[in-house]
Amino acid sequence: MKIGIFDHLDRRDVPLHRYYADRLELVSLYDRLGFYAYHVAEHHATPLGMAPSPSVFLSSVAQRTQRLKFGPLVYTLPLYHPLRVAEEICMLDHLSHGRLQVGVGRGISPIEVGFYGVDPAKSQAMYIESYAVLMQALTSEVLDHEGEFFRFKQVPVELRPLQQPHPPIWYGVGNADGADWCVANNVNAVVNGPIARVREITDRFRAQWAAAGKAESALPLIGTSRHVVVAPTDAQALTIAARAYARWYASFMYLWLRHGSAPQFAPFPESFQEAQKLGLAVAGSPSTVRQLLAEQVDQAGVNYLLSRFAFGDLTPAESTASVELFAAEVMPALCEEVAVS
């Protein structure tokens, strides 16, 4: 069982240069306290994401951390030239001495990809082709490809990743069929949603893994993410979480509401209280959070938990206090309990 961090980098009401400095301080704390990895979302033209270029932000993360793995979750591949993103991946992998984790996807928001002139109806096909080109660029000395969207002929590949044959790949799985692709390609998976939905996908993943004759010890990470607030008492944590979640939710829904639409694959309700009832968020004292997360991890069948400690209008002091309590009083026991169960 491993515990990492997921971060939208959604906007707070502070100058952006200060926002970045505060967040990088928090990432340094994740590194010092022994979290496994730090995963950054990519969003565009929305207060939900202040890191629209994950590579730029992650280059700063690489220089401020020593052990923490990190990466985008995900690179929205239809928005990238695959040769360019391959080169950025190689640079980040070397800058971090081999700590990069590469998440890939087509992008959850058709509105955002549309801003870049991408036809949402073609984004899946673009993603599939771009991923094929990307993997060839990361593992070959010469790039040759003839497709619908991209064409390369005898392009020399001068940059190679430090991790061979390439950094670990991550994918956001929205349905059980997505687990099959992850199994076939040895890809780590992150599943968001209520526990029953997560369990359906983790069961499918493990069944396909076993059917393929692959060793249980080599099983990739299968994770889910939760908004988490830890405070000395349940009442304090719930008060903080409800306030911050309301701000995060407004950013989450910003573009959808402007376009009179709603996210198709997003299970998040409007209030933190409802999110906690659905198992999508947890707030409380260390003992409460420890108990709730241990139950959820067991029920969901995951071997990786991504916590969201910085969201909405949480102040750096509030996030820091929450992280420190979690690392001291929740994380060690949670990992031990899951390992024994």
Image (cartoon, rainbow, N blue to C red):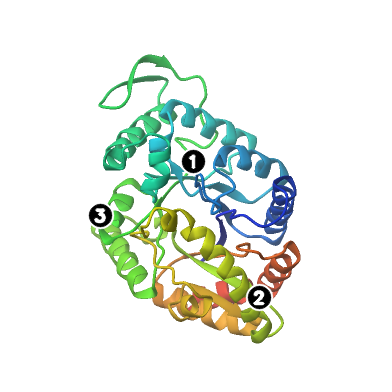
Q: Where residue 221 sits in the image (x, y, percent)?
A: 44, 58
Q: Are marks 2 and 3 in contact (CB under 8 Å)?
A: no
* Among the 4 quarters of the image, the one containing residue 199: bottom left
Q: Nearer the viewer, mark 2 or mark 1?
A: 2
Please tell me which of labels 2 and 3 falls first in the chain: 3
Q: Where residue 115 sits in the image (x, y, percent)?
A: 42, 39
Residue 2 appears in view: no
Q: Nearer the viewer, mark 1 or mark 3?
A: 1
Per the image, label 3 sits on a secondary structure element best described as: loop
Residue 309 appears in view: yes
Residue 212: numbered disc: 3
Q: CA distance from mark 1 to mark 3?
A: 23 Å
Residue ID at (44%, 33%): 80
Q: Between residue 102 and residue 34, name the one nearer to us.
A: 102
Name the amino acid type tagged 3.
Ala
Residue ID at (57%, 75%): 334
Please tell me which of labels 2 and 1 falls first in the chain: 1
Locate residue 27 relative to residue 141 in the image: left or right.
Answer: right
Picture layout, residue 25 above or below residue 200: above
Instruction: Answer few, some or many: residues within 10 Å of disc 1's Cα (few below 14, many 20 plus, some between 14 and 19).
Output: many
* Among the 4 quarters of the image, the one containing residue 323: bottom right
Residue 130: numbered disc: none
Kindly identify which residue carries mark 1.
Answer: 167
Kindly identify which residue carries mark 2.
Answer: 240
Per the image, label 1 sits on a secondary structure element best described as: loop
Name the amino acid type tagged 1.
Pro
Q: CA distance from mark 2 to mark 3?
A: 46 Å
Residue ID at (59%, 53%): 9
Q: Between residue 138 and residue 246, name the one nearer to us.
A: 246
Please tell me which of labels 1 and 3 falls first in the chain: 1
